[in-house]
Image (spheres, rainbow, N blue to C red):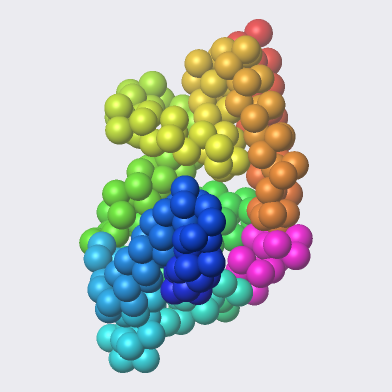
Amino acid sequence: MNFLVSAGSFGLFCYLAGTADSWARAFLIAGIVGAFLGLVNFIPTSVGGAFSDGYALFNMNKEKNAGARRGCWSVFRVYALDTQGVRPRDIPAELFDWVDTSDINDIFVLATALNQYKYLLDRREMDKAEALMQALCDNQHSVFETQKRSCYCDLLFHELIGECRQEELARLFTKELRAYTEAARSDFCVQRIMYAYARLALMDAAKAKEYLDSFHKTCASSIWSGAAIAEHELIALVDSIAGERENAMG
């Protein structure tokens, strides 16, 4: 696509060069940028567990990348099911039950493990889900730091709906994690977790409503319709837990 956009931009540059100088220069710049990005993406590189298209093209067939290859196929299959309205608990377990979480070293294996986590969470197998998420936090190697912060965000959710210990919440909700939740505030999973934090830890009704309103807007426009169904039920779970705690406090 980079090369196609670049070719189109160079064509428009040639067509407009004699009549619309400003537009011609804009398309020339777009063509150069597109060609550069296409070349960079075509060069086989693997950094931090992420592959360029060139690396995938020339190296994914190798035995050392068997897990990444299977994970890549699994991830896109789950994406397809999700957009068709299949919720996580109904996705065939064989798409992710093979994943080894003892040594997470590429982005596709990590994404497959995260799909397994969503499956367990949607089935309300909370202990298994939390154990898996803890393993992902402990065993990620050479993957993006942002993904690790996302995993700690999920651990925060388990603490909120579980024992909700203030010292543990403070340990998990670091300055870095706060920055992550702010940067990812358009993600309905993050909005659900922050709703739980406002409702169960802060007991701030106004803040909780702010996150809840954002959550509903995001879900309404999301293509991930299957995941959105599960997320709504997790919101209901938070409300149920909050109600029980409020009743216990009298």
Q: Compared with residue 154, is residue 43 higher up or lower down, i.e. above or below?
A: below
Residue 109 horizontal side relative to residue 124, left or right: left
Query: From the viewer's perspective, is 109 left or right of 74?
Result: left
Vertical placement of 160 versus 232: above or below?
A: above
Going 68% across and 48% down the picture, which residue do you hit?
222
Please provide percent x and percent y for residue 104. 31, 66
Pick whichever, 119 or 223, lies toward us: 223
Q: Using the image as rendered, state which of residue 22 and residue 140 is in the foreground.
A: 22
Instruction: Give the residue drawn at x 42%, y 82%.
Output: 69
Q: Is residue 86 magenta?
A: yes
Q: Is residue 11 magenta?
A: no
Is 189 situated left or right of 107 in this image?
right
Residue at image location 40% in from the left, 48% down from the top? 151
Front-most of residues 118 and 125: 118
State which region is magenta: 78-92
Residue 227 horizontal/vertical position (percent)? 66, 53
Q: What predominant SS class does the magenta segment belong to?
A: helix
The number of callouts visible is 0
Which of the image's four quarters has the C terminus? top right
* In the image, farthest residue toward the top: 250
Q: Position of residue 156 (x, y in %)?
A: 43, 36
Location of residue 65 (image quadrant): bottom left
